[in-house]
């Protein structure tokens, strides 16, 4: 069984299957979780919603893991997946260049117009120097995700992995279902795929 | 706003407005204009802004005050503090 996993939607937040208390919904829920469980990282407020979601979800996941943090390490990779790429950031940036009479491209919006920025945010925060990648799929495909996860372990440096689904359409439609995987925990993609499917299918 | 009314904005008013605009443009959550020391450095130890923030400040000056900074390296001088920025705006604004 995958030991640590986090599930966040606009409606709820669960860590290892246990609900976190909250009052807010949507993007405000992410800010509430940040204030209640993280804090002291003002860059959070500059992030787009996808990065906020990934940041909060990974922080909760790593808190649940309970290992020493913020020490530089090369043995942990970050491999995430979604469907909407960086759609919300793209839309926000487009809004700054839509009107020729009011054409002021925002650098702060532009820097988030790639889905893999969130993997960088997580790596920077945690001083991870291992592999990071972000793969866009048509839908949640546990088999593909499992294959990619095991492929990441082919790198001899990689001993563990933050992986999972991290999708954001807009401030009211998003989902994080991420987990920690250790090298050698499972030996084939089919088993990993089943474990991922279990996490996706938990009824809260 | 015509040229005459531009001159009627006092430096104090401009500094206050600029602080509000900086807070909004740079997403300085939980900060109020009163929290920003207008004479403290904007970068480095001051508000802890980064290079993307510097670019946003250049956009802010163009959008709100019609000042097009031809040489971005000039920003280093202009963004020394809110006061220095306000003085530059007062002198060069076109709107």
Image (tube, rainbow, N blue to C red):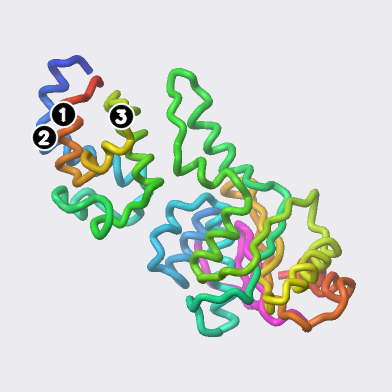
C-alpha gap between disc 3 and disc 2: 21 Å
Residue matched to label 3: B69
Q: Which quarter shows the C terminus of chain B?
A: top left
B90 relative position to A161: left or right? left
Disc number lying in front (2 or 1): 1
Q: How many marks?
A: 3
C-alpha gap between disc 3 and disc 1: 14 Å
Residue matched to label 2: B11
What is the chain identity of the residue bearing mark 3? B
A29 relative position to A162: left or right? left
Neighbor class of circle 2 (other Cα within 10 Å; few <14, some 14-19, many 20+) is some
In the image, what residue occupies the spot 74% across and 80% down? A183
Figure check: A100 above or below A90: above
Q: Where is residue A79 in the image (x, y as percent from the top left)?
A: 69, 64
In the image, what residue occupies the spot 62% across and 46% down? A86
Figure check: A43 above or below A199: above
Q: Are marks 2 and 1 on the same chain?
A: yes
Image quadrant in which you'd find residue A5: bottom right
Magenta span contains residue A15: yes
Q: Earlier in the sequence, mark 2 or mark 1?
A: 2
Type of secondary structure dominating the magenta stretch: loop
What is the chain identity of the residue bearing mark 2? B
- SS assignment at label 2: helix
Magenta extent: A1-23
Magenta span contains residue B10: no
Figure check: A23 above or below A106: below
């Amino acid at each position: 069984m995958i030991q640590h996993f986090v599930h966040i939607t606009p409606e709820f937040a669960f860590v290892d299957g246990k609900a976190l208390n909250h009052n807010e919904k949507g993007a405000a829920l992410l800010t509430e979780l940040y204030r209640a469980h993280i804090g002291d990282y003002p860059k959070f407020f500059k992030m787009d919603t996808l990065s906020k979601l990934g940041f909060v979800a990974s922080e909760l996941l790593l808190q649940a893991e309970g290992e020493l943090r913020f020490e530089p390490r090369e043995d942990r990779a970050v491999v995430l997946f979604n469907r909407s790429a960086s759609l919300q950031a793209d839309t926000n940036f487009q809004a700054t260049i839509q009107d020729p009479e009011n054409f002021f491209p925002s650098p702060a919006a532009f820097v988030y117009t790639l889905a893999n920025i969130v993997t960088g945010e997580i790596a920077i925060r945690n001083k991870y120097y291992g592999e990071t990648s972000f793969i866009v799929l048509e839908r949640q495909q546990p088999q593909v995700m499992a294959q990619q996860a095991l492929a990441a372990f082919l790198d001899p440096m990689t001993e563990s992995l933050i992986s999972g689904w991290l999708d954001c359409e807009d401030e009211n439609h998003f989902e994080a279902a991420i987990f920690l995987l250790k090298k050698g925990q499972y030996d084939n993609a089919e088993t990993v795929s089943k474990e991922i499917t279990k996490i996706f299918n938990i009824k809260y | 706003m015509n040229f005459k009314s531009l001159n009627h904005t006092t430096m104090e008013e401009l500094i206050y407005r600029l602080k509000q605009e900086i807070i909004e443009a740079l997403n300085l959550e939980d900060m109020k204009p009163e929290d920003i020391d207008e004479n403290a450095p904007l970068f480095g130890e001051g508000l802890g802004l980064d290079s993307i923030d510097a670019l946003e400040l250049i956009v802010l000056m163009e959008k709100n005050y019609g000042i097009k900074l031809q040489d971005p390296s000039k920003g280093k001088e202009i963004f020394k503090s809110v006061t220095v920025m306000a003085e530059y705006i007062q002198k060069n604004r076109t709107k």
